[in-house]
Image: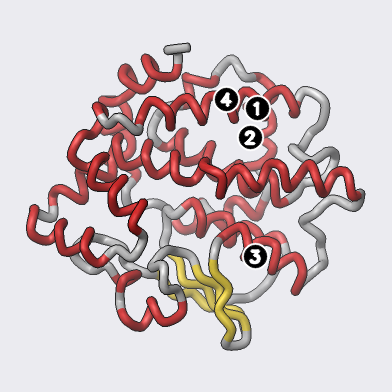
Amino acid sequence: MLELYHYDHSTAAQKIRIALAEKKLEWKSHHLDTSVAKREHFSPEYLKINPRGIVPTLVHDGKAIRESQVILEYLDDAFPEPPLRPASAYDKAMMRLWTKLIDEGLHVHSRVVGMCIVVRHAKAAAGPEELEKYLNEMPETVRKENDRINIREGLDSPLLPRAVSYFKHVFEDMNTTLADSPWLAGDTFSLADISLGVYVTRLKSFQMAPLWSDLEHLNEWYGRFIARPSYAEGVTRWGDKTTSKRQSHGIESFEKISELWNAE
């Protein structure tokens, strides 16, 4: 039996739901409320299966698997058909060069961008006392300190310029690769496309798509990505309760993010 602890607009959870849909696997949903008020991902029950207090966690026949990139590889090992890794050793290596970017910095930078543009508003709205409880209960020290800075400083956060620059370079590298192949690891849709695609969705939800409108191959690839039935199943059907705020705060933030995007 497969069980997934997740929430609607989590990029890490979206990746897993897409992979589950690609493999047509049945799974039980445990949808967590990660708001400052509820913070179900910090509950003693959840911390037993994921001591880091982050989402998602996959439980397969009673055994917990943590970290989204590890979960993706696990699913392809445990349920090899259809494969989500290319056939050749070379293309597998190319796939892993893309997927390793997530843990090397892309996910952290994504959180910085999201927190500075929109999430900080919801966190701060809970009030200083509740926010402090939320941060104090957060097991991850680096995430906690980054969130403190980004909630306090917003678009003036010293962490934001590097995060925006990182995304720009990754998107440009993707565009270059996609000039020669339909997918990031060659001719095969793979974990690389799932892993990177959801971050394009995230920035797009913040109304930032005009920043990469000139990256033709990236945009064509993204169109292929979101046209897959697994995207509708893993992303669209779960909605995003923060959509309106992402749109309004994204529009408010566009000028600043554009300035940082074009700074080089």
Residue 186 is left or right of residue 231, and the answer is: right
Q: Residue at x 75, y 45 (%)?
A: 95
Task: Tell me, for residue 222, which label it has, or none.
Answer: 2
Lower sequence index among marks 4 and 3: 3
Labels 1 & 3 near each other (Cβ < 8 A): no
Q: Is 58 or 9 nearer to us in this picture?
A: 58
Residue 248 is left or right of residue 188, and the answer is: left
Task: Tell me, for residue 188, which label it has, or none.
Answer: none
Labels 1 & 2 near each other (Cβ < 8 A): yes
Secondary structure at badge 2 equals helix
Q: Amino acid at mark 4?
A: His
Q: Residue at x 53, y 55 (%)?
A: 14
* Residue bearing mark 3: 20
Q: Position of residue 213 (x, y in %)?
A: 55, 18
Q: Residue at x 74, y 28 (%)?
A: 178
Tell how many labels.
4
Q: Position of residue 98 (x, y in %)?
A: 68, 41
Q: CA distance from mark 2 to mark 4?
A: 17 Å
